[in-house]
Amino acid sequence: LSGAGVTARGVVDDVCRTVDVGATLAHLAGGSYDGMDGAPIAHVTPGGRHVVGLLWDGAPSAEVIALGQSGELPGVARLLSRGCALRGGAVAEFPSVTLVNHTCALTGVGPGRHGIVNNAFYDRASGEQVVPNASSTWHLSMQWLRDGVQTVFERLPAGTSSACVNDPVDRGASYST
């Protein structure tokens, strides 16, 4: 975490859950996190003009932190010097697969609530196999999000600009790739 609203603390001996990432992003951007399974990480306060979240899928937090501290990732080193990182990172939800955890991070709710339960699964309601993690269906992933579940982008104050880059959990974003 780095930027306005994040106290420069370096590496903190702490851990969060993936659903806490969504609550933290919403909180920092001035949006609501009411009803999320997660809670904002204690090391932040709202008020930043810009919030940028980076998700390194499959990268252990200790590796990213070590590469930043060694100078091999100078951008990470700069972010660490201005903010904080949780030594334990974010604990993944089960099953620990890409689309489940991306959806947890960008909705703040677990797979039992958001409905994306694997990178491929059988949907009992429709009687069909769902493969949201395929290149042909990646852009459709939000259609399988359960009714009533909001993305972080949908929780932002009216008029807030947002962007989602290279992630299918983009419903409500002002811009998405």
Image (cartoon, rainbow, N blue to C red):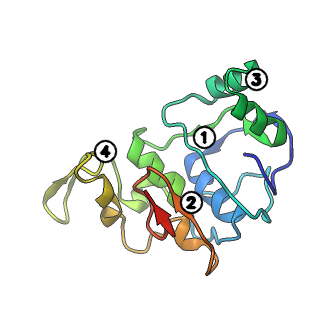
CA distance for labels 4 and 2: 21 Å
Q: Which residue is mark 2?
A: 37
- Report which quarter residue 81 is drawn in: top right
Viewer-nearest of discs 4 and 3: 3
Q: Give the side of residue 27 with respect to residue 96, left or right.
A: right
| 22 or 64, nearer to the observer | 64
The residues bearing labels 3 and 2 have C-alpha atoms spaced at a distance of 32 Å
Q: Which numbered disc covers residue 90?
A: 1
Could you tell me the amino acid type at mark 4? Asn
Residue identified by numbered label 3: 69
| Residue that carries the numbered disc 4 in the rendered image | 119
* Residue occupying the point 83% across, 42% down: 82
Q: Nearer the viewer, mark 3 or mark 2?
A: 3
Q: Earlier in the sequence, mark 4 or mark 3?
A: 3
Mark earlier in primary sequence (1, 2): 2
Question: Which secondary structure lies at badge 1?
Answer: strand
Q: Position of residue 124 (x, y in %)?
A: 19, 60
